Amino acid sequence: MIFVLVLNKYFPPDFDPSLIPRRRGPKNSQQVVRLMAPFSMRCNTCGEYIYKGKKFNARKETVDGEDYYGIKIFRFYIKCTLCSAEITFKTDPKNTDYSAEHGASRNFEPWREEKVVEEEDRLARLEEEENNPMKALENRTVDAKREMDILDALQDIRARNARNERVGQASDLVSRITAEEETEEERERRLAEEEDERLVREVFSKVSMPALPGGSSAAVADSSGDSPTEATPPQLVTIKRKADDVEPDLRSLLPESTRVVRDVKSLGPPPVKKPKSNLKNKLGIKIKK
């Protein structure tokens, strides 16, 4: 059998919450809360140690007549895990902590006793200086020496920081100078490359080369017996200028095979040779073997 826990409740359409009477409980009612022990403690009844973080089902109530600048103070009731003796502790908003109230004593925590010890030492010193002027003079001498030592140490730290800052500035200056030198080298390299490009443009130039009448491809097609192809468009040829700025003849720039084909095309097709007639065939003379 499966049991299903349903948290929803049905409210009829004619439900009116205002008709429900309000329940008024006691003014200082207690609530059951789940909490952890805020500090380690020892039970005063059985001597059991309760460590910090131990979970309890506690009762919480508001302390009557106590507050800290309008902040409420709450009291918690727990039971000892061994003897079930009741233990109470309260919140301490002034010190943002908790304070043990009844049934247990808080374990010794040295970091919480430092302020108390310092205050006691200060009061004892003031009382001793009032009764013994020589002791007051010795204390002032010790305090002056301590202040001088602190100032010397502070001066050493400042000098060390200034030295490190100078070293850092020097390294930054060296890196900046190196970067400037590298930048100057890059600028000189760029100027040299621009000068080389300008010289190359002065020496070399591109001119358009007219295509052959039939084109090299056309010549190849004629020699193979196929139909001739169309002439190729003019192409750009890079030539080198002479010192006297006189451009060379385009024919001299062509390769030997292209020049021969061009000359042949310009002269026209070669004359057709007539086959030699055989005199013996004309006379009808037959030679017997």
Image (tube, rainbow, N blue to C red):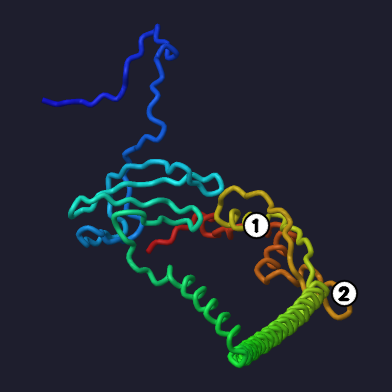
Q: Which of the 4 image quadrants contains residue 240?
A: bottom right
Q: Residue at x 52, y 79 (%)?
A: 124
Mark 2 or mark 1: which comes first in sequence?
Answer: 2
**Secondary-structure class at tag 2:** loop
Image quarter where the N terminus lies is top left
The reply to whether discs 2 and 1 touch (Cβ–Cβ < 8 Å) is no
Q: How far is mark 2 from mark 1, CA to CA?
A: 43 Å
Q: Which numbered tag is attached to residue 272?
A: 1
Residue 164 is at least partly visible in this image: no
Relative vertical location of residue 181 with respect to residue 118 in this rendering, above or below: below
Q: Residue at x 71, y 63 (%)?
A: 262
Residue 47 screen position, x and y as percent: 22, 62
Most foreground residue, 286 or 139: 139
Q: Is residue 184 left or right of residue 120?
A: right
Most foreground residue, 261 or 42: 42
Residue at numbered disc 2? 246
Relative vertical location of residue 167 with respect to residue 65 in this rendering, above or below: below
Q: Residue at x 25, y 59 (%)?
A: 44
Q: Residue furthest top?
A: 14
Q: Which of the 4 image quadrants contains residue 253?
A: bottom right
Q: Amino acid at mark 1?
A: Val
Q: Residue furthest left?
A: 1
